[in-house]
């Protein structure tokens, strides 16, 4: 039996092509006495279509042996030996398994790149691999069967549509580069306005025939620049300045890669899509409340600085606290608060901070020589509830090893900045009270109508959710706006390059087994 002989080798290669799912292949073929599985020309044709279509998901068809399968399939019947037939059968089965694996879990082993990532990676089902492959080959529509194993949400499909669009733009030559120079603004007449206008027309921000004078910066062009800035996470002032032109000059193929990365990152969390969940896109500085795969509410957020990054992970919100106190975390205490105390003893009073010893007893700060401490001290500092509390009027807690949570903030002006990396790792929400109300809708212990009286009382009140709600903290530098257009963000934490190398790199497999 040629199939059995090929699968019996220690490190399986066939016709120079590495086979990735060797252990599963042995199980699958052994269950069917090592007989060929791909006996239908129609099924082989469907499989070829499936592999070619993998590019629409941002994946690479060559990972699934497409070229060799096409070559072997095209030569079948022309002096084909049993060895070639066996190789073709194995490559088809391996390609099917690998593609279904990538669609369900993603190609990149996310945890290897970032140990904080803890998204679910559950097996397809309790069905044995041999049975799953049999079901696939017996299915009338093989692509539809694979789709059922990795169902895509509307948002994912929207990103795929944008990937197709930007691939077409890249294939057509992309867009012209706008030369550097002084800021262009309404009323200017400059030769650089011509490529600026062309750049926006190609991406669809400006009608093809727009502009009474091609080199004049008119009102229609200003609006197009504002729309571009909004979609690219820039200050939407309508001025074509240095940052705006730099964003315009990033080539279309780079935007294609951002979309491919976002599709991959969404595959990492595909199994986390509960009926209700919260998604935070830290690269886009937004939080969304999702119910039945529809975004029903969204708000701007502030995330951690480049030095104190907000991590990518998942957890469950278990309770909400109104009028919270704030205990200064060890890192902030060591690096920010203690140096401030040494410079200004009145700092505690200014920030409404109380001092407690290790037994929880309040200590008079006037009795403490702050200059005597190095990087640690035997005291806890707590900020009492109030209008200037660092956590604002509410905090939303999802226990995690990073001590990250979401909260309100008195620093409202920071939400107007296009790039909002100002926190020490926690997530500040512009409309945190609205999010708290959504979370507590199904919690009998809390009456949303009485929220204002709770806030006015000024006392800390904790409300436990009737059911924990998942929080997914993601990093998508390409996303969608409400109309389905692509939005692109700066790679503020410099994650894209390493993850793109992994997406385009060698295939590795870490397959969850059935329970």
Image: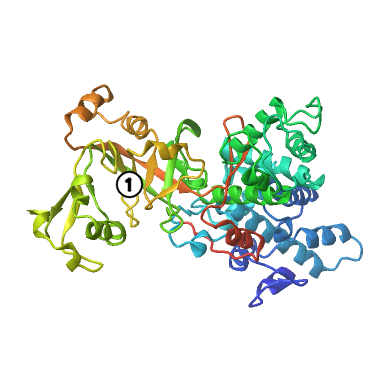
Q: Is residue 342 left or right of residue 476?
A: left
Image quarter of the N terminus: bottom right
Residue 359, percent across and down?
9, 58
Residue name at image x 61 percent, y 62 percent: 502
Q: Is any atom of residue 286 visible in this view? A: yes
Q: Is any atom of residue 36 visible in this view? A: no
Q: Is residue 385 left or right of residue 496?
A: left
Residue at the farthest top position: 449
Q: From the viewer's side, name the closer residue of 411 and 51.
A: 411
Residue name at image x 24 percent, y 28 percent: 444
Q: Secondary structure at mark 1?
A: loop
- Quarter of the image where one finds residue 409: top left
- Quarter of the image where one finds residue 184: top right
Colouring:
rainbow
Please give the count of numbered marks on the rendered protein: 1
Residue 466, percent across and down?
28, 35
Disc 1 marks which residue? 398
Q: From the viewer's side, name the closer residue of 421 and 86.
A: 421
Q: From the viewer's side, name the closer residue of 394 and 60.
A: 394
Q: Is residue 18 above or below residue 117?
A: below
Residue name at image x 50 percent, y 65 percent: 112
Image quarter of the C terminus: bottom left
Residue 497, percent across and down?
60, 60
Q: Is residue 374 left or right of residue 182?
A: left
Q: Is residue 32 above or below residue 457?
A: below
Badge 1: residue crowd in 10 Å (few <14, some 14–19, many ≥20): many
Q: Is residue 39 above or below residue 302?
A: below
């Amino acid at each position: 039996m040629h199939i059995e002989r090929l699968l019996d080798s220690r490190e399986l290669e066939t016709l120079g092509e590495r086979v990735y799912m060797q252990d599963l292949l042995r199980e699958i073929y052994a269950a069917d006495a090592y007989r060929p599985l791909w006996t239908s020309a129609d099924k082989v044709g469907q499989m070829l279509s499936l592999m070619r279509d993998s590019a629409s998901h941002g994946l690479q068809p060559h990972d699934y042996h497409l070229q060799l399968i096409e070559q072997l399939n095209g030569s079948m019947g022309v002096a084909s030996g049993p060895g070639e037939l066996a190789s073709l059968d194995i490559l088809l089965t391996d390609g099917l398994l690998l593609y279904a694996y990538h669609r369900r879990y993603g190609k990149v082993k996310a945890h290897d790149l970032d140990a904080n990532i803890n998204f679910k990676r559950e097996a397809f089902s309790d069905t044995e691999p041999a049975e799953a492959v049999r079901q696939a080959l017996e299915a009338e529509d093989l692509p539809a069967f694979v789709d059922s194993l990795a169902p895509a949400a509307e948002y994912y499909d929207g990103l795929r549509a944008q990937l197709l669009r930007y691939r077409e733009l890249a294939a057509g030559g992309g867009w012209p580069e706008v030369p550097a120079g002084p800021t262009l603004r309404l009323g200017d007449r400059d030769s650089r306005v011509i490529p600026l206008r062309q750049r926006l027309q190609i991406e669809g921000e400006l009608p093809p025939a727009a502009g009474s004078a091609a080199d004049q910066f008119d009102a229609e062009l200003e609006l197009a620049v504002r729309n571009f800035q909004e979609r690219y996470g820039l200050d939407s002032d309508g001025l074509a300045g240095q940052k705006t032109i730099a964003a315009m000059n990033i080539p279309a193929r780079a935007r294609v890669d951002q979309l491919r990365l976002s599709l991959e990152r969404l595959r990492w969390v595909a199994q986390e899509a509960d009926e209700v969940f919260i998604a935070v896109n830290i690269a886009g500085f937004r939080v969304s409340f999702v119910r039945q795969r529809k975004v029903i509410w969204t708000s701007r957020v502030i995330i951690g600085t480049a030095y104190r990054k907000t991590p990518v992970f998942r957890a469950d919100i278990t309770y909400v606290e109104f009028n919270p106190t704030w205990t200064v975390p060890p890192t902030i205490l060591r690096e920010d608060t203690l140096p401030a105390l040494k410079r200004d003893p009145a700092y505690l009073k200014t920030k409404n901070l109380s001092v407690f010893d290790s037994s929880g007893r309040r200590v008079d700060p006037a009795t403490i020589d702050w200059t005597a401490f190095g990087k640690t001290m035997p005291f806890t500092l707590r900020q009492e509830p109030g209008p200037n509390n660092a956590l604002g009027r509410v905090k939303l807690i999802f226990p995690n090893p990073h001590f990250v949570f979401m909260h309100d903030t008195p620093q409202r002006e920071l939400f107007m900045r296009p790039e909002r990396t100002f926190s020490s790792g926690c997530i500040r929400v512009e409309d945190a009270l609205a999010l708290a109300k959504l979370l507590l809708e199904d919690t009998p212990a809390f009456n949303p109508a009485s929220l204002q009286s709770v806030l006015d009382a000024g006392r800390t009140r904790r409300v436990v959710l009737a059911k924990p709600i998942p929080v997914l903290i993601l990093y998508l530098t390409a996303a969608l706006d409400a109309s389905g257009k692509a939005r692109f963000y700066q790679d503020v934490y410099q994650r894209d390059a390493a993850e793109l190398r992994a997406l385009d790199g060698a295939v590795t497999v870490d397959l969850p087994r059935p329970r």
